[in-house]
Image (spheres, rainbow, N blue to C red):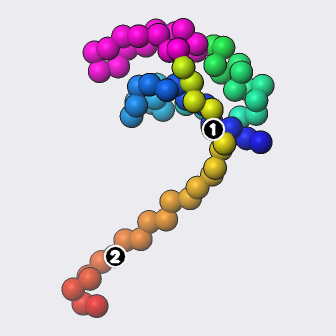
Amino acid sequence: MRLVVKPDMLFRKRGKSGLVALNLDMAQVAEFVKQRLGKEVEMGGCKAPITTFIVEPFMPHFTFRLFLKGLDRL
């Protein structure tokens, strides 16, 4: 099973800070957590160590975008 791992904190900034990993196996998740557990991070003026991670199944999804022009003519 492929997995996603991310800290259970620092919402909305985790991805840009390199704190989210996608499509990993369990050994890769363990290594990712080992490298970051206890690491002190600062976001939004708050500074704290990472103590808890969320691991969940990786579910790829696709984004479909539809751009409509001239709706007033329909």
Viewer-nearest residue: 49 or 23: 49
At a point 52% along the width and 25% down the height, the residue shown is 7
Report the disc number at residue 68.
2
Whole-percent x and y of residue 4?
63, 36
User: Total number of numbered labels?
Assistant: 2
In the picture, residue 56 is in which quadrant?
top right
- The answer to whether 66 appears left or right of 39 in the picture is left
Which stretch appears magenta?
A: 36-51
- The answer to whether 34 appears left or right of 69 in the picture is right
On screen, residue 56 above or below 61: above
At a point 66% along the width and 14% down the height, the residue shown is 34
- The answer to whether 67 appears left or right of 38 in the picture is left
Report the disc number at residue 56.
1
Whole-percent x and y of residue 15?
48, 32
Whole-percent x and y of residue 71?
26, 83
On screen, residue 24 above or below 29: below
